[in-house]
Image (cartoon, rainbow, N blue to C red):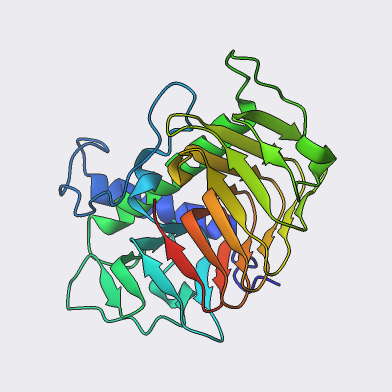
Amino acid sequence: MNKFESISKPIMWSTTLLLAAILAGCGGGSSGPASTITQPGTTCSGASCVNLGTAAHYAILANTGIDTAPGASVITGNIATGPGVTSTAITGFALTLPAASPYSTSAQVSGKVYAFDYAPPTPTEVNTASNAMGTAYTAAAGMAPAGGGLTTACPGTGALGGLIIAPGVYNCTVAISIATDVTLDGSATDVWVIRTTQALNQASATTVHLTGGALAKNVFWQVAGDVTVGSTAHMEGIILGQTAINFGNASSINGRLMAQTAVNLNMTTVTQP
């Protein structure tokens, strides 16, 4: 179970609003220090994409905590916790924080590590990114097919193993399972939005394949329940999770992990698109 999910959201958001107001100053949210956070990697562009906003500044963004245990992970990109959540909720990374710095570093992270208790403008930045993550989740949940014969049917009635899935917006009201390898086949401009009102479970030693030029930055998994990726499994795409995202031992993803609660890793390789 996610050890960060018990954090009190009312207290967290009260703290967020107070500190964000102080940091913004009398002139409103547009004033204050300029952003220190650069956007690494690339993102989906076009009307059929899910707009990540400033959440795209991170390979991992989790509102309540990020943990790697028992094994160290390898992260390409920035990571951050959400509003009101301090760096104590980023565990297993052996963080190094210079005095008065807006970010820390870790040997496991090629980018930078951000948390609400770091120097300005980081508290405002992570608050904005968290809001953007929530907006992206809601936008993905409400997307409709945009022509080209795309369908909203749930592929395989949620059982994706063995399927070849064309680009489109897919709506599942059952849990998504990936028991064997699955392939997303399309071009470099095609977009997949695969969403479920339940959980997503990928079995150990399975792979999500991209073929035909398909790109991870154009694949979105919008999941209301927990996301669980088994040991040595490989995932592709942007995971927008309303609850926890859990990756097993020696698992990997080419994509981004966006969790409204926690991200839990174990010797996981996360590579931003």
At x 57% / y 70%, what residue is drawn?
251
The residue lying furthest to the front in this view is 212
| Image quadrant where one finds the N terminus | bottom right
The image shows residue 61, relative to residue 5, as above or below, that is above
At x 70% / y 57%, what residue is drawn?
226
In the figure, residue 164 lies in which quadrant? top right
In-image side of 110 versus 154 (left or right): left
Q: 20 and 114: which one is in front?
A: 114
In the figure, residue 97 lies in which quadrant? bottom left
Q: At which x and y percent is residue 96?
A: 27, 81
Q: At which x and y percent is residue 64?
A: 53, 63
| Mark count | 0
Q: At which x and y percent is residue 143?
A: 60, 24
At x 33% / y 81%, what residue is drawn?
95
Residue 7 visible at all: yes
Q: 266 and 242: which one is in front?
A: 266
The image shows residue 248, relative to residue 238, as above or below, that is below
The image shows residue 272, relative to residue 217, as above or below, that is below
In-image side of 88 versus 244 (left or right): left
Q: At which x and y percent is residue 2?
A: 65, 70
The residue lying furthest to the top in this view is 147
Residue 173 visible at all: no
The image shows residue 136, relative to residue 169, as above or below, that is below
At x 19% / y 70%, what residue is drawn?
101
